[in-house]
Image (cartoon, rainbow, N blue to C red):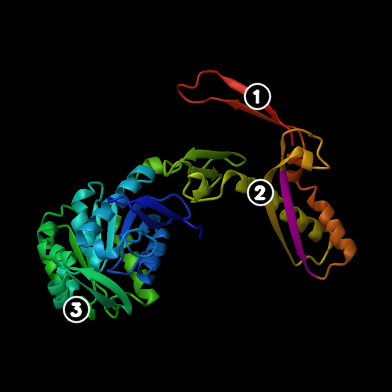
């Protein structure tokens, strides 16, 4: 899948590292995922659940809380309240660049955090918790005897999941002040509580307390056989499919993000997805694709860039033409692959170009032909590659006629010629 890393500012100005998990087609809804205490966005449970949700058409943003993973800031200065603030900052980023999250998902302490953060994310219509404690102060039990040292000396280094973390007294004071069940009572959203009766880190009684405090609509799903971290892939995938099925009842599908009906054969429709700055829905007959720009250009890298589509058209046309020729001539071509690269070069650096000033488009095409082909057969196949229709189009005179359509279009039109 494409590299969908991103960064956004936390409430205190630090950069938070995030990752988008995007469906192949348009996202029918968006979710915000909060990871477990000291874990990170790339922990197996977070990545597996998020990626599985994309198969149900749900886009997911997961990120590292302050001081963890790739995010900036000092972990020792963070607490439960700062985690909630980070979630609000993530929702703000989604609201500005994607869509505000309609679904909040939290694992372990992240589950408690989304319950606390929900009231500050009005667009969220549903909340799902996985192995969440009913009281954030539950994590203090993980500190063991170090908790007393922290309270007495102001800070201590604690080993959690085999890694050292510096915890300060302000963390203990912050979690002690939380009244999470009061927030659950006035949640005002659909709630799904998921918990394993075998959870040895956060007991099943926590799920009972959350479920009892919540008002309807609320649901509970037992994750029997699962451990706290959902280390088995099948458990994470079960959680994702359950959340996807449950949330359909509550999530509103934003029709503005969905492409129009299929276009007739021979036509291609491209329309704004209103996700990020550049993302587009591409409809070619019954087929749906996404076009976007890479992160370095200000896009979300949710799909190929325009020139990628151009290269894909040339490459696929090349391979198809070679395959047709090989079958017609009975050539033993077993496999063909085409790798292409596009760049702008100075015309003066091109010995074969007619243009002598400015820049020209330069496409390099590498063709790998496999099979027991002799030199003459390879030369014939390589020659036929230059005769594919798209190749010929790029080298011929192309006229693009542009006109406005729609109720307010008027009658303006323009014609332009684009030499190959």
Looking at the image, which is closer to me, 151 or 314?
A: 151
Tell me the residue at 33%/60% (across/down).
244
**Residue 67 lies in quadrant:** bottom left
Which residue shows up at 56% across the image and 44% down it?
285
Residue at (28% x, 77% y) in the render: 160
Based on the picture, tell me whether residue 375 belongs to the magenta stretch.
no
Q: From mark 1 to mark 3, how far is it between C-alphas?
A: 75 Å
Question: Sequence order check: which comes first, mark 1 or mark 3?
Answer: 3
The answer to whether residue 221 of the structure is visible from this angle is no
Asked whether, in this view, residue 185 is left or right of residue 323, the answer is left
Q: Which residues are magenta?
A: 362-371
Q: CA distance from mark 2 to mark 3?
A: 59 Å
Whole-percent x and y of residue 135?
14, 67
**Camera-nearest label, 1 or 3:** 3
Q: Quadrant of the C terminus?
A: top right
Magenta stretch, main secondary structure, is strand
Q: Nearer the viewer, residue 341 or 10?
A: 10
Residue 309 pos. (x, y %): 61, 47
Density class for disc 1 (Cα within 10 Å; few <14, some 14-19, many ≥20) is: few
- Quickly name the residue at label 1: 415
Which of the labelled discs sits on residue 311, or is there none? 2
Q: Residue at x 56, y 19 (%)?
A: 412
Q: Is residue 366 magenta?
A: yes
Q: In the displayed structure, would residue 396 be above or below residue 291?
A: above
Q: Locate residue 84: give its quadrant.
A: bottom left
Kindly identify which residue carries mark 3: 146
């Amino acid at each position: 899948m494409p590299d969908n890393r991103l960064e956004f500012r936390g409430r205190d100005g630090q950069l938070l590292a995030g990752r988008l998990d995007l469906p192949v087609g348009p996202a029918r809804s968006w979710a915000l995922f909060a990871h477990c205490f000291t874990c990170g966005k790339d922990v197996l449970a977070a990545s597996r659940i998020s990626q599985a949700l994309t198969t149900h058409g749900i886009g997911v943003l997961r990120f590292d809380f302050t001081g963890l993973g790739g995010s900036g800031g000092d972990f020792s200065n963070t607490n439960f309240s700062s985690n909630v603030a980070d979630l609000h900052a993530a929702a703000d980023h989604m609201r500005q660049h994607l869509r505000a999250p309609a679904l909040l998902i939290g694992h372990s302490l992240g589950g408690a955090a989304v319950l606390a953060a929900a009231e500050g994310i009005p667009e969220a219509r549903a909340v799902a918790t996985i192995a969440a404690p009913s009281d954030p102060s539950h994590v203090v039990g993980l500190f063991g005897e170090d908790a007393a040292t922290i309270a007495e000396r102001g800070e201590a280094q604690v080993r959690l999941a085999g890694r050292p973390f510096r915890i300060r007294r302000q963390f203990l004071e912050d979690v002690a002040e939380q009244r999470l069940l009061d927030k659950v009572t006035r949640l005002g959203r659909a709630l799904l509580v998921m918990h394993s009766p075998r959870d040895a880190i956060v007991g099943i009684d926590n799920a009972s307390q959350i479920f009892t405090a919540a008002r309807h609509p609320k649901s509970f799903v037992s994750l029997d056989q699962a451990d706290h971290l959902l280390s088995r892939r099948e458990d994470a995938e079960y959680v994702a499919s359950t959340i996807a099925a449950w949330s359909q009842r509550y999530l509103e599908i934003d029709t503005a993000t969905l492409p129009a009906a299929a276009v007739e054969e021979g036509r291609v429709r491209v329309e704004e997805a209103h996700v990020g700055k550049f993302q587009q829905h591409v409809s070619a007959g019954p087929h749906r694709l996404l076009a976007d720009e890479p992160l370095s250009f200000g896009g979300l890298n949710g799909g190929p860039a325009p020139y990628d589509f151009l290269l894909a058209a040339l490459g696929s046309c090349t391979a198809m033409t070679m395959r047709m020729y090989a079958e017609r001539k009975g050539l033993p071509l077993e496999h063909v692959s085409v790798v292409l690269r596009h760049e702008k070069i100075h015309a003066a650096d091109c010995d074969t170009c007619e243009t002598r000033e400015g820049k020209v488009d330069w496409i390099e095409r590498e063709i790998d032909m496999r099979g027991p082909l002799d030199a003459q057969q390879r030369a014939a196949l390589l020659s036929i590659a230059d005769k594919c229709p798209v190749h010929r189009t790029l080298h011929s005179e192309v006229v693009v006629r542009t006109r406005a359509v729609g109720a307010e279009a008027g009658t303006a039109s323009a014609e332009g010629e684009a030499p190959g």
